[in-house]
Image: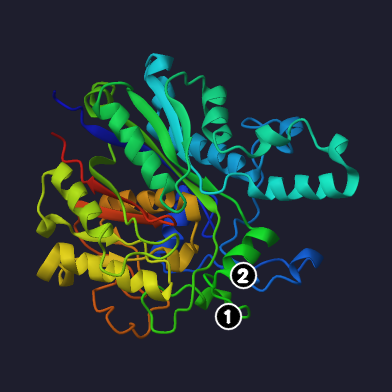
Amino acid sequence: MKLNRVAVTGLGAMCGLGNNLDDVWNNAVAGKSGVSKIPNIEDTKMWPVQIAGLVKDFEISEDLLPAKEKARFDIFIHYALHCADEALKQSKLLDAGYDPYMIGSIIGTGLGGFPEIEKANETYNEKGPRRVSPFFVPSFIPNMAPGKISMRWNFRGINHAVSSACASAAHAIGSAASEIMLGRQDAVVTGGSEAVISGLTFAGFNAMKALSKTRNDEPELASRPFDKDRNGFVMGEGCGILVLENLDKAKARGAKILAEIVGFGATADAYHITSPHPDGEGTIPCMKHALTQAGIEPKDIDYINAHGTSTPTGDIAETNAIKAVFGEHAYKLNVSSTKSMTGHLLGAAGGIESVFCIKAITEGTIPPTINLNEPSEGCDLNYTPNNSIKKDIKYVLNNSFGFGGTNATTIFKKYEGN
């Protein structure tokens, strides 16, 4: 069976670096940090961590979500609609004339509308069950993000959410690409959205000793993947959305093709609920599977957008896995962790980072790993420290790993017009 090629024709993005694709990309290339102090409201004074990669000054357009509906849906759904709108406008998919049953939406999220759950629980405890809103369940369930996208634009094809911790968006993108490769869909809106800046979330991750909490007064310096002074990740929020299409059909309608998805790998460590396998027993085959599907050799990869969360164990484990897969070429290619600027968007990480990968290809620019002043022992690759660089890029690999030992690797290719 011949598989269809998969084109990327639209992008949408928002995070602490900005509320649209251009601002996010330009600030990333400039090496700016999107991490900031959480507004000092009464509820946050007891939080052990006071910083995050916060989305700022955002209000969803009434065209996407009327005023009477805004309070009915968690903010992660707002983000997904906003970025889907941006990606769809760039792709001009709505003018393609595709059968609505051949356009789907698959969105990843790690925790869904967790803040809405927290608020509803407070209402339940303080006022009793009769005061819980009838809109509570639809407000937070993960599949409401792709559901609202489908309703807004009348997409009647495949529609579901993926929730696999910090690999959620990457798994969503891989699933969407497979639907197109197999001919079951002509186009899919996909990616990830996350908005879990809340007290209970911070308390949980802090109890696990996963968060950086020593730089509350220097938020822009806190996320520092691969640096010897890293001490945990910084929570982020936001969204990254891609419009994927059957490449032949996209060409036929005259769409601008930004890149292709040519490889995807997914594996499990089967090792520990939170820690990666130190020898890369899951991540190594994950990258190898993606390379095999892409039909390329390790030496063909020009840039790796690393999972690179800024945790002591995770960064060195990923570095070791990259060395095992790429051998000497590991020292010749560029690696960077854009989480140094965005913080860790959890289930949306693979969405925003896929956007960075595709922009790196189209702009010939590799975004940096900021705050990398002295690499940690064993972290000896070219992590593109502190400054972006210009480079002609043909193949980019993106890694996303999550709690439960779940792994995903995606490979994007420059579209060369054939």
Q: Is residue 360 left or right of residue 97?
A: left
Q: Nearer the viewer, residue 150 or 285?
A: 285
Residue 84 % position (x, y): 49, 36
Task: Name the residue beneath numbered marker 1.
Answer: 215
| Mark 2 neighbour class, 10 Å CA radius: few under 14, some 14 to 19, many 20 or more | many
339 and 158: which is toward the camera: 158
Q: Which mark is residue 228?
A: none
Looking at the image, how many numbered discs can be counted on the residues? Answer: 2
Q: Are marks 1 and 2 in contact (CB under 8 Å)?
A: yes
**Residue 51: image tag:** 2
In this view, the residue farthest toward the right is 127
Residue type pointed to by label 2: Ile
Q: Which quadrant, please, contains the C terminus?
A: top left
Kind of element beneath mark 1: loop
- Per the model, the C-alpha gap separating discs 1 and 2 is 8 Å
Q: Is residue 224 left or right of residue 215?
A: left
On the image, the x and y values in percent for residue 400 come to 36, 55
Where is residue 15? Give x, y as percent. 53, 55
**Secondary structure at numbered mark 2:** strand
Q: Residue at x 36, y 64 (%)?
A: 276
Residue at 34% x, 55% y is: 270
* 81 over 52 or under it: above or below: above
Which of the two discs, 1 and 2, labels the residue nearer the N terminus?
Answer: 2
* Closer to the camera in the image, 31 or 78: 78
**Quadrant that contains the N terminus:** top left
At 27% from the left edge and 58% from the top edge, which residue is drawn? 283
At a point 61% along the width and 40% down the height, the residue shown is: 78
Of all residues shown, which one is farthest toward the front?
271
Residue 179 visible in the current orientation: yes
In this orientation, does residue 255 appear? no
Residue 231 placement (x, y as % from top left): 48, 78
- Dot 1 crowding, Cα within 10 Å, few <14, some 14–19, many 20+: some
